[in-house]
Amino acid sequence: MPALFSRYATPFVTGLFLVSLLSGIALFFHWGPGALHPMHEWLSMVLIVPFVLHLQRNWRAFANYFKRPPMAIALALSLIAALAFFVPGASGKGRVAPPQFALAHRILGATVAEIAPALALSPEALSARLSAAGIAPSDPSASLLDLAAPAGKTEADLARALIGAPSGT
């Protein structure tokens, strides 16, 4: 059994690294379907197993890297690059949401009267739709998000109610 793992460790490291690389690039540029994010996360986790097997198989050669400065320099720079993401304000304004999410959040921050015309509904009809979804539109000056919060509804629940989709779709 160890010989089998040994034989496939490097090919799996290569294959899963390429999947992680390409899906990571697609995620960075916001390309592709929604399945990319879970695929990237899960297959990156799976990559750990062949990586450990690859290290085990090539341990002597790997350990030799620690005898020279390039490994220490590379590890230090990698750590600094990773830590930079945890420093407040280091990456500009912080994380910027994709424009479709920013638009949806802005819409959900509007009132029933402001959103109803965009949905080709009267404010009364939209209020009835929200009530049917368990969101009581009691305050006309409240944002949709403020109306959903006391009902324990998420942004996804609110979006479903706005488009008239049944719960859970």
Image: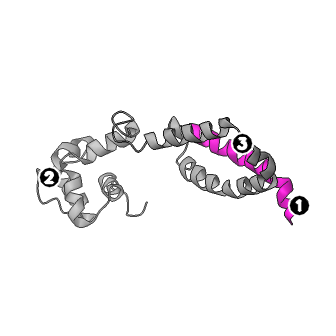
> Which residue position is annotated with label 2?
142
Whether 12 is among the magenta residues is yes
User: Type of residue at label 3?
Assistant: Lys
Whether 5 is among the magenta residues is yes
Q: What element carries label 1?
A: helix
In the rendered image, residue 122, in percent from the top left (x then y), is placed at: 18, 48
Instruction: Give the residues drawn in magenta, as a range.
Output: 1-25
User: Type of residue at label 1?
Assistant: Ala
- Is residue 54 found left or right of 77 in the rendered image? right
Q: Nearer the viewer, residue 44 or 107?
A: 44
> Which quadrant of the figure has residue 104?
top left
Which callout, 2 or 3, points at the residue further toward the start of the chain? 3
Q: Residue furthest front?
A: 67
In the rendered image, residue 18, in percent from the top left (x then y), is placed at: 69, 42
Up-down relation of residue 120 to residue 132 (above or below) = above
Tell me the crowding category of disc 3: few under 14, some 14 to 19, or many 20 or more residues within 10 angstroms, Cα based.
few
Q: Can see residue 110? A: yes
What residue lies at 80% left-to-right and 46% top-to-bottom?
61
What residue lies at 27% left-to-right and 42% top-to-bottom?
106
> Which quadrant of the figure has residue 139?
bottom left
> Which residue position is annotated with label 1?
3
Numbered mark located on residue 40 in the image: none
Up-down relation of residue 11 to residue 134 (above or below) = above
Q: How many marks?
A: 3
Mark 1–mark 3 distance (CA, rounded to whole Å):
29 Å
- Is residue 92 found left or right of 79 in the rendered image? left
Tell me the crowding category of disc 2: few under 14, some 14 to 19, or many 20 or more residues within 10 angstroms, Cα based.
some
> Which residue position is annotated with label 3?
67
